[in-house]
Image (cartoon, grey):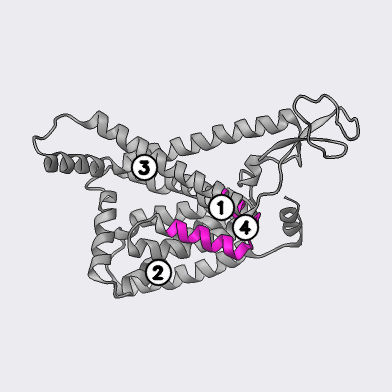
Amino acid sequence: MMRKICKNCGTPPSGGDLFCRRCGGSEFVVYDPPAGKGRSIGSFLIWLAVYFGVQTYVSVAFIVFSISEMHPTFEGTINYLVEVLEKKTVLISVVSSFLFIAVYLVVTAIRQGKRKKLGSVPARRLFRETGFRGAPAAVCLFSVVLGAALNVVISFVVAVIPWPDFASDSFDQTYSVLSADVTPLWLIILAVAVCAPLCEELLFRGIGCSRLTGSFPKAVAVIITSAVFGVVHGTPIAIAYATVFGVIQAFIFLRHRSLLPVVLCHFGFNFTSVFLEYLPADPALNLGVLFICAAAALGTGYLILKKSETTGEKNESL
């Protein structure tokens, strides 16, 4: 928690002191102490609560404005509300994502303005801390290819695993709303390939990894954020592959300290999933695509995570 201290000796003022009672200095600045483990986890949990709170708020708003009639029975009313949510799931996702990002930008801008006004010690840029910075063009391009290739490889692995019936059924039911027969294709692409990457990477990598790596070893931060990222995807199959994907994303983020490559990788992954079902059912063709994508994933992953002396120095200085 930020508090005022004397710039000369570090003594906090008492009440409305105009001069430091220890050294007589007249300049006070704001000190933002390093985050402890509890503070780091608490910050991540608060933003996680905001994320779900925004989704709940938007869902309730859509229900209120979509109700055209009330059924005479309680069960009928519940079924009607569930049907409304199912039809509006993709649109709710889009609105919730933009609203969450807006809340984050407003809160961060206010905190950054307060630090700038009071002269924070040490001076930090909150937007840069959570990854609002550029990345090399080659890394961005490789990230899109990596995401698309990973989707093909992970989809193949998921398809050959003998999942229990309840896991397969829950996965199909949950993601059935992403069918073009139910929702317009442009809205699916906007929600899945644009809004979801922006919102989820900001929360789990930009906020989560940034907060936790300040107090925990990087491996612990990666495990925690990736596990939570997997759990929020709901179904057993989605939890499994989302956790694996989250680990890869966390390594990319910690390597470059930028949201840009992880958002683009997530975009490539989700955008490919929209059109993967249109791949012809030709075993030979599918196997060839699998090997090409596996090679592309390994190659681009190596190039993205490969350390260079110059970039390493830049990352250590942040």
166 relative to 35 in the view: left or right: left
Q: Nearer the viewer, residue 122 or 194?
A: 122
Residue type for callout 4: Leu
From this view, report whether residue 267 is shown above or below residue 246. Answer: above
Chief SS of the magenta region? helix
Q: CA distance from mark 2 to mark 1?
A: 41 Å
Q: CA distance from mark 3 to mark 1?
A: 25 Å
Pointer 2 local density, CA inside 10 Å: few below 14, some 14–19, many at least 20: some
| Circles 4 and 1 in contact, beta carbons < 8 Å | no
Q: Mark 2 near mark 4, Cβ–Cβ under 8 Å?
A: no
Residue designated by label 3: 93
Quadrant placement of the N terminus: top right
Magenta segment range?
A: 207-230
To which residue does mark 2 refer?
289
**Category of crowding for the residue at label 3, using alpha-carbon neighbours closer than 10 angstroms: few (below 14), some (14–19), many (at least 20):** many
Residue type indicated by callout 2: Val
Q: Earlier in the sequence, mark 2 or mark 4?
A: 4
Residue 35 at x, y = what percent?
66, 49
Question: Which kind of residue does numbered mark 1 sit on?
Answer: Ile
Q: Relative to 12, does residue 43 appear above or below in the rendering?
A: below
Q: Nearer the viewer, residue 315 or 43?
A: 43
Between the residue at mark 4 and the residue at mark 1, the CA separation in whole angstroms equals 18 Å
**From mark 2 to mark 3, how far is it between C-alphas?**
31 Å
Residue 146 appears anywhere in the view: no
Q: Which residue is mark 1?
A: 41
Would you name the residue on which mark 4 appears?
A: 254
Question: Is residue 221 magenta-colored?
Answer: yes
